[in-house]
Amino acid sequence: MVGNGNLTATAGGKNVSSGASIEKGTSVTIKFSPAKEFKTTKLNISELGYVNTYDTTEEQSYTFTMSSDATVQVTFTQIDYAISISGNTDFGSVTADKSRAVSGASVKLTIKPQTNSVLTSLIVDGVEKVSSVSSNTFSFTMPSHNVNITYEFVKYYNITTGAVNNGTISVNKTSVIKGTEITVTAVPDKGYELLEITLSYKVNGQDKTQNLDLNGSSIKFTMPDSDVELTARFTKPDSRELVNYMILGDSYTDTAFWKDFISDFSSVKDAKDIGIGGTVVTQWITGLTSSFEHNNATQDIRIKDKYNVSNFVFHIGVNDIDGGTAKETVVANLKTLFTDYHNAYPQAQIYWVSLSLNTMFASQHTSDYLYVNAEIQKYMNGIDYLTYIDTCSKMFPDNQPVPDWFADGLHFNTDGYNTWSALILDALGYPKATVGDFGKADIYYSSNTFKANSDGTISNTGKVNGEQSLWFSELYEQNVYAEMNVKVNKITNKDEYPKFGLALKSKNNHVFFYIDAGSALTGKYAGLTYRTPVTLNGGFLASQYWNWSVGIGGNSTAVYTGGNYVKLGLLKVGSDLYFYVNDVIVNSVSNLTGMDGKSAIGLTVFNLDVTIKDYSTTTNVQSYIDAINTVASTRFDANSAYNIKGNNITNTTAGGESSAWATGVNHSKFYFETEITLNSVLNSDAAPKAGITVNLQGVGTLLFYIDAINTGSFGTNAWVGYVYRPSGTTEWNWAKANATYVRGLQYTSSKYAKLGLYKNGSRFIFTVNGNAVLDTSQFSQFTGQVNVGVMVFNLAYNAKNCGIVLSDKLLDRMFTTRNMADDIVVDGILDDAKWSNYSSDSIYSSYATDGSGVGFKAMAFMGTNAIYVAYEITSKTYVTNNTQGWYLNFNVEILVPNSKGDQVQTYAVAYNVGHMVKSYAFISKKEGSVYKTVVEVAIPYISTETLTGKEASIKLGLACRPGSEVAIGINGGTDSDWWTGPNHAYNNPLTVNKNGIDASSIIK
């Protein structure tokens, strides 16, 4: 060991020590290495003139030939390490007494906070050391590595107490950082009691005041990012009722209209509302010391005798203006009111809430309200005991009444009172609290009944009028998605129809997508209502009532009691609105009043205490838009006969008739689809069937099916159809059935046929592999809400990818795509707009020249996907109401010559159609002295093996009985009448030959 390292030498293969004699010419090797915490920096052999520098902790060697005496010197230097410091220099600095130090050295840090700043973090080598700082210094021993030091200074703010009479106040800390909880102690003098403690500070340079909550066991507040001053008011008790804030005035303050005053002012200690509807200013001047007559009764007010009041809050003057008092007189009377109350209560602060505009008297008095507001605001500005509360310019920024705020044109609805009361509370220093992510959105305030719980959930308590809303804070957007999980705790106000859901609020509407919980809290109906301005008796606008007759909605999978939460979502894209229950769109609507622009979004409840959690919003809605056009997977009710996994069904043994019903689907408008393959026939059934079914209890069952005939080669029949079975019977009504051929249909040998069923009221469209093949509206008994599922007869099968669409908007788009071509809908409405879809070459008409209007107009059109045929027949022909004897009614024959030299033939009559007809309408009614019958038919090309859409002509035939009128049309008469009239013309073709309409004669 040499000093701070090791040095050895070898000569001729032997170790030698210092001072040894070595023969000239011998090779000498020296090896050297530093000790721990040292490094080699230099090797010097002066006699040889050799010098080399190093910066290493590794062993080194050097070999030379002995030529003379040699002195070997190796320099070992102790290692030093870097010290780096970083932090926010805006409020102070931290420096070290050295920038590098060797291991074991003492390093001293000096902390220099700026004025009104404090060091809140000092991390040395990864360890927080702020608690070890003493007298703004901290020392540490340098380790054997580089040291990184970070620091943070935070500005602190001062708490001062203003002049206080009749007591003292103190705080547990006088200089703290933002967010620190401060405890205030107030001690009244003997004979006095604490009335209020006021916190004064600045927000963005603007003065702000807040009255502290005195209701708890201790008085506390959270330090803002500003110096604060505390003042307290102590009052001497007397026998009068102590009132901290007295609200008084006209019907706006009357609790008959302001039903939720107590919950709105729940944070204000000793608040009292004595407002009386219909009163005027002079009555409240009298009421200071006396009673007054009003509404045929003595109003025993006598405020000075009965109440010890610290603050008065007036809303008064509207009835004066409406009653014809000159605006200048109203201003003078208000000044007298303020003076009288100040003389009676010299320590009290007097607030006057600006007169509200209204729609009931808008045309007569708006300018007078605004005049009084301006004059009183100007008068109050110079008087310290008077405060003007401006609600008018905030709620009516255009100086015009906003109908959306009002229930009856004069008094506010719930939305109006939520905002009006919040503006008053803000001015009094009791701002409505933000709860979680909820509070105020634009000018719309949440109800004052929600609270944040320690577990992160939010819950509410009941209100008198039962309607409560909770808006996401500062979220007022045109495109937005919000979701939350909701659990229902109990019903309030004994409501038999309580509701909860997600809502939107804009200037002209409050839209509410709700779950109708019902009195048993088991309801699953997902509905829609809204409250938008309507014209009331008197000709003025107001948003008085919710519109419960929208009629958009259906069942959902909502379960929300017994500890269960239901997930609700609401998407707004412009005016397009979508309501989700458990991630499935169950309701949607477009173009509601006031919904095309920005709106608040949140929760609305009726007479329910609820708890919410997992709430969130986003304005990045593209992913939701992209997902809207997909079919949501459906679930099925449990059925032990099947193997049901998610949205897939397998049946191997259950024979006879069997069904699997989609869970929670009970709607009047929907699309349901499934992909199905048939594996084998059970019970040797000759005509097994499989398809989509709907059921309405007490009405019956409707089945749209594949007719998997088993009399030849199973799986080769390509016919599909629909059939109806009334409730209470096992027999299907084949008289009202219909079927059609589907070209290329395959559904066996693991090949899947995709079946779809659209329902919109009484209209059903059945699709096969994406093609609409049957369209019927004849089953009006199924117009309402029905269940939907999969039904089979004697088949082992697999059904997969079962899905459901319940969104009105998406369904509307899907129905539109199912129109056969050129936006033509087969509905029997042959107006000018529809006729204009056809070229003149495809239309022919012929009418009698006697002015009777008797005649016809016919059309045939080769569409993109189907053939269209339309007849409009005006005659004096009688037709019966016989539903079975089709030959007793108008009968349109349709014949299409094809490329094989033969012709495809089908028909349409009043109560039935031939095979291949996908959709038809047959309408007959009397108009004056004639009957008008409309027939409209669509035949898809896919319904035949031979039609292509390129056929040269269509032959139309009409069977009818022209002649004298003998009865009242399709709804009356007897069969015998059909045969008794002259000129019976059954099978006489009513046809014309012109540009593709091939025929030979016309009935005269």
Image (cartoon, rainbow, N blue to C red):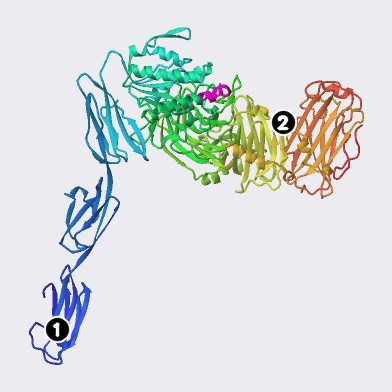
The residue closer to the viewer here, 712 or 509, is: 509
Mark 2 lies on a secondary structure that is: strand
Amino acid found under the numbered disc labelled 1: Thr
Residue 10's tag is: 1
867 lies left or right of 336: right
Q: Position of residue 509 (x, y in %)?
A: 54, 31
Q: Is residue 690 visible?
A: no
Amino acid found under the numbered disc labelled 2: Lys
Question: Can you tell which of label 2 and label 1 is closer to the viewer?
Answer: 1
- How many other residues sit within 10 Å of disc 2, few (<14), some (14-19) or many (≥20)? some
Determine which quarter of the picture holds residue 850: top right
713 lies left or right of 886: left
Q: Position of residue 173 (x, y in %)?
A: 22, 37
Q: Is residue 906 visible?
A: yes
Task: Answer with mark 2 or mark 1, whichever residue precedes in sequence.
Answer: 1
Q: Position of residue 776 (x, y in %)?
A: 70, 34
- How many other residues sit within 10 Å of disc 1, few (<14), some (14-19) or many (≥20)? some
Tell me which residue sits at (39%, 26%) in the image: 387
From the image, tell me which residue sits under label 2.
Answer: 736
The residue closer to the viewer here, 623 or 506, is: 506
288 lies left or right of 841: left
Residue 111, above or below 696: below
Q: Position of residue 235 (x, y in %)?
A: 26, 21
Residue 143, above or below 902: below
Residue 302, above or below 140: above
Quadrant (top left/top right/bottom left/bottom right) for the C terminus:
top right
Q: Which residues are magenta?
A: 355-369
